[in-house]
Amino acid sequence: MSAPGTTAATPAHPATRGTIFLERARVLSHLAYDAEQYVLRLAAPRCAAHAAPGSFAHLTCDNTIPMRRPLSIMRADAQAGWIEILYKVVGPGLHALAARKVGEELSVLGPIGRAFTPDPQRPRPLLIGGGVGIPPMVFLAEALRTDARAAWQPLVLMGSEVPFPFRPRPSTIIVPGIPDGTIACMPLLEEWRVASRLASRSDFPGCFPGFVTELADAWLAKLAPAVLAQVGIYACGPTPMLAATAALARRYQLPCQVSLEEFMACGVGGCAGCTVLVSTPDGPAMKRVCVDGPVFDAYTVFPPS
């Protein structure tokens, strides 16, 4: 039996049946940052209990707007029963969501999608997040802290052309191979003792002055072959960034998983409105980002140019 206010959804995709939940979620906090960015924390215990890095939630922004919005989960606390979402206002739906107040309720369908699968044989994961692709990287970094399968040593690189949705500060964690002067980090990751660095072409203090993939390239180029063999790449962000990440991974012969960003209608595989062309052992196929992804092997989505 579902918890009060919670029902198990019945999505169109058999692999996800019974794992996606429909909840009336209460707004616990809603913090505003520069450039119309918000961090929304919701009491959604069933979603929180099943969320994994890379999964997302489908939110009803307002009763006057029928279409839900798919938003990546940035953090989830199964014990406390909350999920946290970082989003940037784009369009009327998210503008309406930004007006929701603490104590209000909204409908949440989730968690949805296939998550990242870190490889213990490559204990030095490189996490690359661009813009609204930052949240899954935070979630993955937090998950690695409690994953006992390996002595994980993640490095999180984040890029943004608008102010970051947190107050960057100089890192106290030394990362060999990072270009001189690139010292800005995400404070939350720093508190977790997870190394992070920031990139931007907007001349923000302490940030690498370029694309986040260029920062990743600069770091990878300095690694000894034995260390490079321990690296796997995980990325989320705009499609051009993911294509550049796939090319980077191919050049260094590294495995790479990417979380795709696509417009979605139903979010549970029924409408096929978010399909992408993917290479499979049986040939090219159209896959749904919502339930077949959003995480894919980068090489199956971005072939060599």
Image: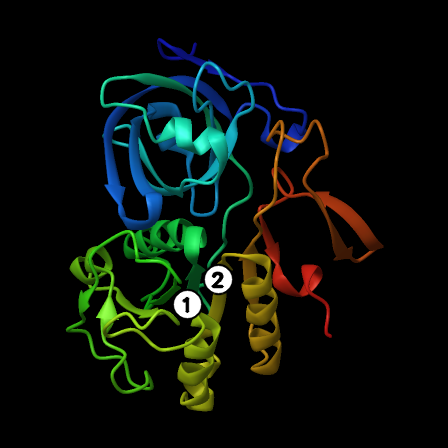
Numbered tag placed on residue 9 in the rendering: none
Numbered tag placed on residue 125 in the rendering: 1
**Disc 2 and disc 1 in contact, CB within 8 angstroms:** yes
Measure the alpha-carbon separation of dots 2 and 1: 7 Å
Q: Give the residue at mark 2.
A: 234
In the picture provided, is 219 more to the left or to the right than 240?
Answer: left
Residue 198 in the image, given as x and y percentages of width and height: 32, 68
Q: Residue at x 41, y 32 (%)?
A: 95
Kindly report which numbered mark, 2 or 1, lies closer to the viewer in this rendering: 2
Task: Quarter of the image for the N terminus: give it.
Answer: top left
Ranked by sequence position, the earlier of labels 2 and 1 is 1
Residue 38, by quadrant, is top left
Task: Quarter of the image for the C terminus: give it.
Answer: bottom right
Residue 132 visible at all: yes
Residue 160 in the image, given as x and y percentages of width and height: 39, 62
Q: Residue at x 33, y 44 (%)?
A: 37
Q: Secondary structure at mark 1?
A: strand
In the picture provided, is 29 more to the left or to the right than 127?
Answer: left
Q: Secondary structure at mark 2?
A: strand
Residue 190, by quadrant, is bottom left
Q: Using a 10 Å C-alpha cutoff, classify the residue at mark 1 as few (fewer than 14 neighbours), some (14 to 19) or many (20 or more).
A: many
Residue 126 in the image, given as x and y percentages of width and height: 42, 69
Along the line of sight, the residue nearer the viewer: 29 or 192 = 29
Q: Residue at x 18, y 71 (%)?
A: 171
Q: Residue at x 36, y 64 (%)?
A: 150
Along the line of sight, the residue nearer the viewer: 242 or 91 = 91
What's the amino acid at mark 2? Tyr
